[in-house]
Image (tube, grey):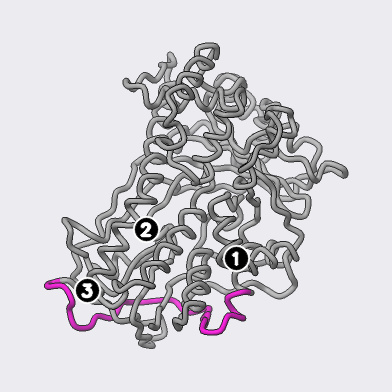
Amino acid sequence: MHALVIGAGPTGLALAVMLARDGHRVTVLERDAGPPPGGAEAAWASWSRPGVTQFRHPHLLLPAVFRTLRTQIPEVLDELTSMGLRPGNLLDGARRFGLLDGERPGDECFMMMDVRRPLFEAALDAVACRTAGVTVRRHTGVRALLAGRERVSRRPHVVGVLTADGEAVLADLVVDAAGRNSPVGRMLRDLGAPGPVEERDESAFLAYTRYFRAASGTEADVPLWPSAHYESVSTISCAGDAGLRSVSFFVSSQDRALRLLHREQAWDAALRLFPAEARWAGNGEPVTGVIAMSGMESRRRAYVVSGVPVATGIVSIGDAWATTNPLFGLGVSLGLLQATLLRALLRTRDADDPQRLTLGFHQVTEGILGRFHHHLGVWDRHRLAEIEGLSRQPPAVYEPGGPDWQFRRTLDTVKLRDPDILRAVAATAALLATPETAFSDPALVERVFALGRLAEQPWEPGPSRAELLAAVGSG
């Protein structure tokens, strides 16, 4: 089979390597330039990826994707190690602060890695370029899809693409890995396809990130837990490579007052109000300004409608299929897990039937990854509504009704108080288990609520909204 992959991001490159190792011929088309010569720091400093808005925001290789790389493409981890990156464990922070009951068998499943995305893509590019059967063509955009004989009545069958330069590139399967802003949906409609159908939340988060170089002697320090949720904002703290670390503020896109965080002085003034994050970054030297990111609403594209594919000969993976709030660092993980699902399906008889392949991929994607995406979307909607209520004058406590949101918010405040609860939360955060599976024990659920009844408020102790606004305004 000749597979044509649109997009040389992490998901597209990883899939290309995996398919080539199964004996397929793979061509990857990417409109942006490749990594510059000069190694890791050159990739970070001068590699421009206009098509990837989150290119310089922190990325987490969470345990599920770390395991995928270790078992499927271990050379990528070797490349990252040669750049100075070291794996860690999602539980390292809690263990360092004495919040765990020692190390248990199975804790090794939480191995992970924080990474700057330019370095991760450079490592994948290096492996892909020396993998037999993979051809990566940079500076090659895609203008349109090419259709052949229909395999499903009144549905286009994609047989290749037309590049921006007018070259026809034919393939047995086209894989859309062009990211959250993929133009493939429009291209399919240009062929007469009824879709894809897109579900998209109206509200979203904005992110404001700064990187710091750790002070001498603190390079190995890790945060207590990567994310935290406060009254008006959420944060994520990452320990990167080369002694770098980052702190990101996530705010509601409707919260116009906190958009001042794009200014360095306002961002620094806000940081001083959050003791854990200030301590994490306070001894370091800033190495970037504030890096802002918008357009992070949750969305999902359905390529099967009422049991019928909108087209055959093409599938979408990674952010081209669905996007999530980057606060939880799951984008790369979901993309690489979906790549392994497609690889497994192409090893079956369904690979020879375009309709069965499209339907089978839709079914396995929704059945396994769709549940995670649903849970994340529900969390976003509740959290944004909670922040909106607290932003009103006078503030209003968010009460959605039903126990689900109460349980999730309670988990945020009690997870570090009980080793069993923390490991269950870690399993869901790592995409190793769904919330239903991780908290299937009624006794564990009761412990969550018992600890939650002792909590004074459903978020981390921190500044009030008035204090935060005053600091940001003065900054």
- 348 is higher (above) or lower (below) than 110: below
Q: Secondary structure at mark 2?
A: loop
Amino acid type of disc 1? Answer: Glu
Percent position (x, y) of residue 97?
74, 29
Percent position (x, y) of residue 324?
44, 47
Q: Which mark is residue 191?
A: 3
Residue 263 in view: no
Q: Are marks 3 and 2 in contact (CB under 8 Å)?
A: no
Q: Residue at x 66, y 63 (%)?
A: 77
Q: Which mark is residue 121?
A: 1
Question: What is the quadrant of residue 460 in the picture?
Answer: top right
Q: Which mark is residue 321?
A: 2
Question: What is the quadrant of residue 421 in the picture?
Answer: top right
Q: Residue at x 57, y 56 (%)?
A: 67
Point out the tag, 3 or 2, that comes first from the N-terminus.
Answer: 3
In front: 75, or 231? 75
Point out the tag, 1 or 3, that comes first from the N-terminus.
Answer: 1
In front: 368, or 227? 368
Q: Nearer the viewer, mark 1 or mark 3?
A: 1
Q: Is residue 113 left or right of residue 369?
A: right
Q: Is residue 333 left or right of residue 218?
A: left
Percent position (x, y) of residue 183?
36, 66
Return the residue found at the far left: 153
